[in-house]
Amino acid sequence: MARLLKAKPLADEAGERIKSAVNRWKKAGIAPAVAVLLAEGDPASAAYAAAKGRLAAKLGIGYELITFASDVTKNRLLKEIRRLNEDNGVHGILLELPLPAGLDSSRLAAALDPLKDIDGITPASKLACMMNETGLRPATPQSCIQLIKSAGVTLKGSHIVVVGRGETVGRPLMQMLLHENATVTVCHSHTKDLARMIQGADVLVTAAGKVNLIMPEMVHPGLVLIDAGINMLGDESGITGDAAPQTADYVDAMSPVPGGVGTLTTALLFENALHALTLQQAAGRLQV
Ligand code: NAP
């Protein structure tokens, strides 16, 4: 049985770091606060937004959930984003994705102030990620990297196979791993022989959103497997990852779903909010 890479201890450590930083900001007269924009219609997004609100309360961070009907227009959302960009009492803005069909998430993301962009979705944040420059990085790839490190893996020189080249996880993760001097192979739906790719890997991160994409016969005993996939099981029985659960018997270490990447991601979003405050201070926007 593989070592189980639970995220809770890492999320708790992040929580302690965040609480200390929040106290420092509050002593300096600034109460850290984030705003989340949620368009109704996706029950999973609503549940994630509610979970973020509970965590924000524990961490002492202000949290404003702004909910819209599922037929909200692009212009209405743009107006709200612009209002939040201008609001000095809001330090981080999160657009809960996916948006209802017909709304162009890239267009809305581009309207966010890059210094408040706590999930790294603006063009400026994406460019900074690609060029390894100062900026806010998406939380999910950060979570994957922390979990890899928690397995005792040194990123430099390791061969890491990333399954998925999506904008949220695979693509930014590939860039962040390259900046850490890992050797990265990115696979996607056109990859011919996924199992053969995985045989040469030290670490596999899967972020495809496909149930049972990774099966025991595709892995090897030395592999560290990070499962970032989230797949909704029908009949409200929860979520599962991309790797079949029995894969855990055939690898060295594996992160569970639930209780893995997603658990840490939420905490790291709030750590990003504090990083956002530091960037805003450096830009001379805060009266400390
Ligand atoms: P996405 O944009 O839909 O990308 C999915 C990627 O998987 C695509 O690159 C796709 O290939 C690839 N793929 C699909 N089927 C495949 C197959 N059979 N073999 C190999 N590759 C395949 O997804 P995303 O937004 O990046 O999210 C990826 C997963 O992470 C989802 O399950 C999502 O729910 C989850 N997620 C988790 C967290 C967390 O905190 N844990 C946060 C965000 C997202 P093509 O490019 O060729 O289409």
Image: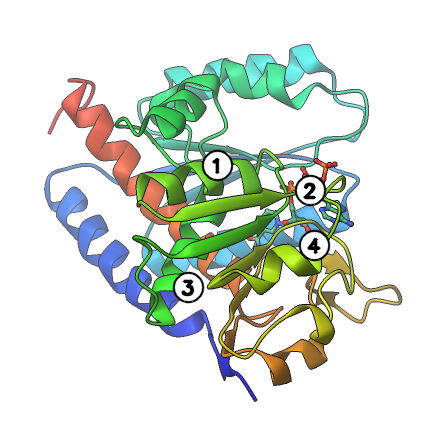
Q: Position of residue 205 (x, y in %)?
A: 55, 56
Residue kind at label 4, given as amino acid type: Leu
The answer to which quarter of the image holds residue 7 is bottom left
| Total numbered labels | 4
Find disc 1 in the rendering and name its residue: 172
Of the residues tagged 4 and 3, which is closer to the observer? Answer: 4
Residue kind at label 1, given as amino acid type: Pro
Find disc 3 in the rendering and name its residue: 147
Q: Sequence order check: which comes first, mark 2 or mark 3?
A: 3
Check residue 194 in the rendering and tell me which mark sits there, or answer none: 4
Tag 3: Cα neighbours inside 10 Å, few (<14), some, or many (≥20)? many
Cβ–Cβ under 8 Å for marks 2 and 3: no
Residue located at (37% from left, 47% from top): 270
Q: Which of 244 and 111 is in front in this view?
A: 244
Q: In which quarter of the image is the C terminus?
A: top left
**Which image quadrant shows ligand 1?**
top right
In three-dimensional space, the C-alpha distance between marks 4 and 1, rounded to whole angstroms, equals 20 Å
In three-dimensional space, the C-alpha distance between marks 2 and 4, rounded to whole angstroms, equals 9 Å
Residue located at (50% from left, 28% from top): 121
